[in-house]
Image (spheres, rainbow, N blue to C red):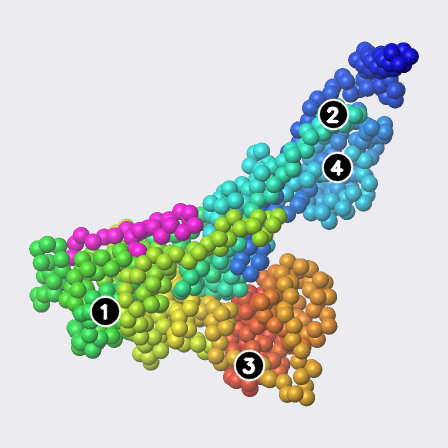
Amino acid sequence: MRRNRQNRTLRTITLVTLAAMITLASNVFFVTIRHVHLRSGTDLSVYAESANIVTQTIRALRGNIYDRNGTVIAQDNQTYDIYCVLDPSLVNTEGDIAYIKEEDKPHTAEVLSDVLKMDYDTVMGFLNQKGIFQTELGSKGRSLTKAVRDEIESYKLTGVGFTNSTKRVYPLGTFASNLIGYAQKDEDGNVSGKMGLEQILNSYLAGENGSRTYQADKQGHILPGMRETVVSEKNGYNVTLTLDQNIQTSLEQSFKMTEEMFDVDRVWGAAMEVHTGKIVAWGQSPSFDPNKLEISEYNNYGTELPYEPGSTLKTFTWAAAINEGVYDGEATTNGYAYCYGSDGEGNPVRVSNNEIGCIYNAHHANYGALDFDHGLIYSANSAATAIQTELITPAIHLDYLKKFGFFQNVDTDGLPEQAGVLNFSEPSEKLSLSYGQGSSVNVLQMLQAYSAIFSDGTMVKPYFVESVRDAYDPSRVIYQAETKVIGNPIKPETAKQVQGILYRTVNDSDGTAKYYQIPECELMGKTGTTELAVGGTYESGKTITSIMCALPAEDPQVIVYYCFQAKYDQGAHVRSDAAVNFIRSVALAYGFTGSIEPQPVPSEETTEEYRSWDMPILLNHSVDYASKKLSGYGCEIYVLGEGSTVIDQFPRSTDTVTSGQRVFLLTDTSSFTMPDMTGWTRKDVAALWAVSGFGFQLSGEGKVVSQSVPPGTAVTKGSDIKVVFK
């Protein structure tokens, strides 16, 4: 009995299996021979005749580039490319028409020409093409915003569709563009860096594309029952730089001021933290807007344009002599000229008979018996040559310059660099080096070397890239920069002594850098003016004017360097407004503002009115979000610009905000509406200055009684904004 039951079970299983196989075979027969799905009755002939495997690329987003405060410098924006289907055979899976019918073309062209701001006949020309499946609409139909796409879709135009695309955008425009560079699409549709940090950091920023693979007919319909395979894309890493938007914006504003004041060929400048090497501003003019790519100058001046620095290099002549222990600042030398011959081994020696030639001070100034300290304060060439040949030797001088890193690449963040040219064979070349001519350096070398002068003799390497982080998990750090000490070319006591002379250069009534003083804090520094060599001679009629300084003088934290090349102007250092504007912006950004009044301390009776909170992070949020976030704080909110997104804020997210305090939300770096500042304190005005990056001229003490730009007036960069306190 038991064996019979088992046999019946086996027969049942066998019959069921056989029936399934017959059904499957029949289905295969009908699908293969009749092109009909047996169970559903679907006619598959339209698919079987032209089935193919389709693989679509899913584009990865390129990583963002931020400034040190999280402001976006470069990012990918999601965009859309429009296409219009013209093939009358195209229907969708429900059998509905999916192309632009002949009678619908005029209406479609009217809508598209209106929304895309195109000529109607041009659109009709695209739509009337024959023998093609679909058409695009040229450049005006590419990289469309979501708002434009949504507007077109609202008309429900048959046969009009969109494909996703991305566009690399630079919200801050010309912001350090020769450093940042740009990225653009190649022939395959991939976005890659073509210049600057965009190119150098491409392996971090680029990400990895994904893919979607499926089976479809010629019209793009996915076959029923067919699987699709999706490999997800991996977006690029985000890069944070050391640059500070406020300081950078002020630097570029100063460039424009210089161009208005002088017949300028080029302007460049930078700011760097003394002890860390972080470069917080770096730029040049002419530059370019990477959104437009109208580029006239591809070189990064600070790394690829070596130049003769002039008298700012004298500092290292003095530092060498002081560090060697042979310097007496009160000892005197000839304050008019250094006439020289040769010792027979290519070294210059002082002579009385003008054997080879004479080195004179600028404008042939004669200081008589000049002490060496005033030799640097007055920037006397005669004193520099005397130190190089009589206190030390040209060879010792050169050895120190190399210890300071000159004539060799700094090698910062992979940037292309030209180290400059050392000319040190003839007596004249050796003497010229003592006062900064005849040989060339670059900005990175100058910043690196001066970090030793303005500290305790410790020299640090400049850098721009702060970190690289995972776009999906910001806590995952791919790269983190650290301060790199290059060496200690001088002793701490040497640095201190040199600083004392440079302090006097700015703050003495007869110091050559006195016109660079600012009211916020004291500086130390050195001016430079050098003739521009063209074709091996100095008869070009042009000079490079520069200022190298550090602030605050009592404890230097930031180095500021500003240079421009122009026709010779004897008053170039007197007309210092542009550089001073930049220096003051640094002082404000770092809080080196001893003259700014503190907020009044509330009394016990009014403590409730002065509650404080941690300032929230509002960057990259909408203005509506920021306003709601601050509601209940009791703050006065000032929105600067017509934008809809906050790109900078004051107070910062690391600060506190109190009830009644003025809060500034920047949405546009090009213009804003001037508020009524009557009754504002210097701290209020300084905050507006810092967050907008616009230049202000402040006079008087107390509270604001007048302003040169009336309230409600739109102001743009370069506007003359004068504020009087009383």
- Labelled pair 2, 3 in contact (Cβ < 8 Å): no
Nearer to us in this view, 540 or 195: 195
- Secondary structure under tag 3 reads loop
From this viewpoint, is residue 71 visible?
Answer: yes
Relative placement, left or right, of 698 versus 363 is right
In this view, the mark in front (4 or 2): 2
Relative placement, left or right, of 539 versus 726 is left
Q: Which residue is pictured at 36% across the width and 52% down the height?
A: 410
Circle 3 sits on which residue?
598
- Labelled pair 4, 2 in contact (Cβ < 8 Å): no
Q: Which residue is pictured at 55% across the width and 61% down the height?
A: 69
Dot placed on the residue nearer the N-terminal end, 4 or 2? 4
Expressed as whole percent of the image width and height from the top left, the position of residue 418 reads: 35, 49
Which three-letter amino acid code belongs to the residue tagged 1?
Ile
Which three-letter amino acid code belongs to the residue tagged 2?
Ala
Q: For the residue carrying disc 1, how many other residues have a C-alpha within 10 Å: few (<14), some (14-19), or many (20+)?
A: many
Expressed as whole percent of the image width and height from the top left, the position of residue 250 reads: 50, 65
Circle 1 sits on which residue?
322
Magenta highlight range:
405-428
User: In this view, which residue lies farthest toward the right?
Assistant: 1
Dot placed on the residue nearer the N-terminal end, 4 or 1? 4
Circle 2 sits on which residue?
216
Nearer to us in this view, 525 or 29: 29
Which three-letter amino acid code belongs to the residue tagged 3?
Pro
In this view, the mark in front (4 or 1): 1
Q: Residues under labels 2 and 3: Cα distance? A: 71 Å
Circle 4 sits on which residue?
161
Q: Residues under labels 4 and 1: Cα distance? A: 75 Å
Residue 271 quadrant: bottom left
